[in-house]
Amino acid sequence: MISRTNPSQPVRIGIIGGGLMGREAASAFARWFTLVDFPVRVELVAVCDIQPGLLEWFSQIPTVRCLTVDHHELLAREDVDVVYVAVPHHLHESIYLDVLRAGKDLLAEKPFGVDLAVARRIRDEAKALGRFVRVSSEFPFLPGAQRIHQMAATGAFGRILEIRAGFLHSSDLDPLKPINWKRQNRFCGEIGVMGDLGLHVAHIPLRLGWRSKTLYAQLQKVYTSRPDGKGGRADCDTWDNATLHTTVKLGDYAAPMTLEMKRMAPTETNTWHIEILGTDLGARYSTKEPKTFWTYRRGKEQSWEKTDLGFAVPFKTITGSIFEPGFPDLMQQMWAAFIAERAGKLGDRFGCATPDEAVASHELWSAALASHRNQSVVVPA
Ligand SMILES: NC(=O)c1ccc[n+]([C@@H]2O[C@H](COP(=O)([O-])OP(=O)(O)OC[C@H]3O[C@@H](n4cnc5c(N)ncnc54)[C@H](O)[C@@H]3O)[C@@H](O)[C@H]2O)c1
């Protein structure tokens, strides 16, 4: 006879913002049992969105006992331990601070506020209140990203010659695509595409301690207005593309690191990539080929070697080791890292982006704005 009871108290989660990402998070929790021997259970108990129509979707989840249009109501509940906030960027500061002051832990969506000053305020408040806070960035949980991080952390590349990382979209190439909040400074701040895609790109370099000592940015705005969806036009004033040429100090030498965040990258749909070239080894990984890992080894002949990685994620699941991971898997892996670290059970596995790393990413975006404004090389804060 197998007992069906699990005595451990679940971590009870609330979601504020039930749009694209709120639903992805709900899906990760709903199949939590696919994680093998994971030490902590989770339960989605409450969801808030200002659109009642969206809330209806969450009513099909049996553990959800509160659906509300007012996030204060969700935060007043004693049966919520952790809150995931996935709302437009101009609301991040006020809602993140409300979460922290309500005594809840937070998985914040990126960006960590709309600018550097806001990011510092949220980080400092979390520290003062002793809350556990991490920031969303899923792609480092990919098998290829994990492999490249591990190689860099153990010095496998030899002397690093160059680093390139990026996150590329192309859907904005269509000038008839209607405007949405992600394309307007009043919702996203001046950092534009860097706030939207940047932490995904910077997370691994920042985790490796690679801080940019100098930075030169090329920022582009392409279409300055778009259909407003109501028969008129609306301003589209965020930066579309950002290329940051930086120099990172790596021990007693320096190397160039290029970070690219683009919404106007022909042929790319959600392509996250990273490449590190060294004197002994080089490695390259892109979501364009999700299970393929490319390695270069110094030798007589110059060539790339191709390895199929399979489902090598940090937290084991029931999924077979030869299968390919997708975005929903990464979302669940990121959440597993958050929950494990909060419980003191992360061990030596890769953790979610920290508030300090999110602030460090904002230092890059701030420097990029200054560099572009003055057309000069700047030293990030
Ligand atoms: N980590 C990732 O890969 C990833 C991908 C896409 C978006 N995001 C981030 O997730 C966040 C949300 O983006 P999205 O794509 O889900 O946007 P979305 O527009 O699909 O969803 C946002 C939701 O927030 C709701 N909302 C607005 N104001 C609210 C309020 N005061 N209280 C409660 N709900 C409110 C809206 O009604 C909407 O349903 C952003 O920070 C975005 O950058 C992250």
Image (cartoon, rainbow, N blue to C red):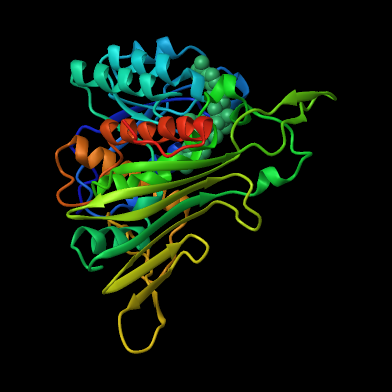
Q: On screen, 77 above or below 181? A: above
Q: Residue at x 42, y 30 (%)?
A: 366
- Residue 8: quarter of image: top left
Q: Give residue 13's position: percent from left, percent from top.
A: 34, 28
Q: Give residue 219's position: percent from left, percent from top.
A: 56, 39
From this viewpoint, is residue 109 visible?
no
Q: On screen, 183 above or below 250? A: above
* Front position in the image: 217 or 326: 217
* Front position in the image: 346 or 48: 346
* Front position in the image: 375 or 247: 375
Viewport quadrant of the C terminus: top left
- Residue 203: quarter of image: top left
From this viewpoint, is residue 369 visible?
yes
Q: Give residue 251's position: percent from left, percent from top.
A: 18, 53
Viewport quadrant of the N terminus: bottom left
- Residue 101: quarter of image: top left
Q: On screen, 74 above or below 171? A: above
Image-based side of 127 in relation to 235, left or right: left
In this view, the residue farthest toward the right is: 231
Q: Residue at x 59, y 34 (%)?
A: 239
Q: Give residue 374's position: percent from left, percent from top.
A: 50, 31
Badge count: 0
